[in-house]
Image (cartoon, rainbow, N blue to C red):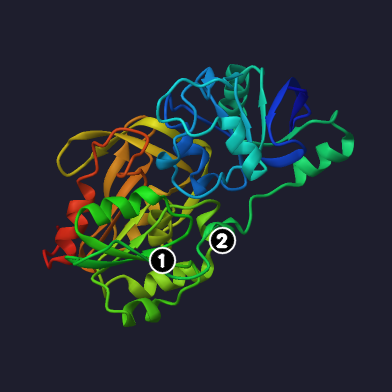
Amino acid sequence: MSIAYLLLADGTVLTGRSFGAVGTRVAELVFTTGMTGAAESLTDPSYAGQAICFTFPQLGNYGICLDDCESEKVHAAAIVCREYCGAPSNFRCGMTVGELLARDGVVGIEGVDTRRITQLIRTHGVMNAAVTDAPPTPELLEAVRNYAVSGVVAAASAAEPVRLGRGAARYSVALMDYGYKKSIADCLIKRGCSVTVYPHSTPAEAVLAAGHDGVMLSNGPGDPAENVFEIAQIKALMGRIPVFGICLGHQMMALAQGARTAKMKFGHRGANQPAKDLKTGRVYVTSQNHGYAVESASLAATPGALRYVNVNDGSVEGVDYPTLNAFSVQFHPEAHGGPRDSEGLFDRFIALMGGERNA
């Protein structure tokens, strides 16, 4: 391993050791609190344009099982951890984390104080950073300060429609790909659905003309308000076919109905976020990965009704649209990795497609 540097937008420089690919990557630095789920996090398209700081002290001790990956590549620009384990112990291990990063051109740095980094982000909010194998320069600092996450949905989305699932299916689902996790499709297929993955740029009329029974709006990276075309298509879909939105899909559904979203100070990323169902009073422990949230007060002027709230900070975790036969959640009911407390939401979507109004 060679020397690597983490340069923060405030000018702080931390020195560590490199692993994975070599070079320089500039990104938005965020932290995740998950103790497991490294393969899932690394391959989650929602991290496009970002550098992930893992708060759990060691990364890579059980390696990468390719069956656990949520997409075909690592979408994050860089990885930051306290200790990297290059000799994993797990019978399912197919490669090391370092080998995965090197394969996909992602740089990593270990040996830095991730507690300090996390405390900085919690105090000052997410900030831009660079991971580099060369001593930082004033020019690099300027590039870090000028960086913005943009155009990431188009980069993460499929280029052509793809049909998933085999054999007879109870229902046909259109999965709008804004950077979807494979486990979302898996949860639908497990329930007897055929799934057609559509590129983010697919017009609403093309989806409706295909004769699907429901539409799933996926997770994805970046600022939801940036996706003007996609939001317009969602508006055209809602009320004409059952719709279920997750994470970015949830945010864009709210925007399509006239609500607002705002960037959070440091977001929710990890597998231990409590979300309360206001209808039943039950609290679910959920897996989450987002840096934007729907503004609760803005829902008053929409057909949406607040359904779930985050127990820690009161932020919006889910919205029902009873007059539009649609609902959405900010958290990930497919989890992977994380608790499966809320996977039953896929059954609710199945009920909507089966004609059960306001399921």
Q: Nearer the viewer, residue 249 or 86?
A: 86
Q: Is residue 158 left or right of residue 81?
A: left
x and y percentages locating residue 132 in the rendered image: 77, 33
Please say if the residues under marks 2 and 1 sit with CB atoms less than 8 Å apart: no
- Specify the quadrant that holds the N terminus: top right
Q: Quadrant of residue 3?
A: top right
Q: Is residue 295 left or right of residue 239?
A: right
Q: CA distance from mark 2 to mark 1?
A: 12 Å
x and y percentages locating residue 254 in the rendered image: 38, 59
Residue at the image point whose x is 39% and y is 76% from the top:
204
Q: Nearer the viewer, residue 88 or 328?
A: 88
Q: Can residue 97 be seen at all in this image of the molecule?
A: yes
Query: For the residue carrying disc 2, how many other residues have a C-alpha within 10 Å: few (<14), some (14-19), or many (20+)?
Result: some
Q: Secondary structure at mark 1?
A: helix
Q: Secondary structure at mark 2?
A: helix
Identify the residue under disc 2. 226
**Residue located farthest toward the left when viewing the structure as drawn:** 356
Q: Give the residue type that dot 1 points to.
A: Ala
Q: Can residue 77 be seen at all in this image of the molecule?
A: no
Identify the residue under disc 1. 256
- Specify the quadrant that holds the C terminus: bottom left
x and y percentages locating residue 143 in the rendered image: 80, 44
Q: Work out whether 50 lies above or below 156.
A: above
Q: Give the residue type that dot 2 points to.
A: Glu
Residue at the image point whose x is 31% and y is 44% from the top:
334
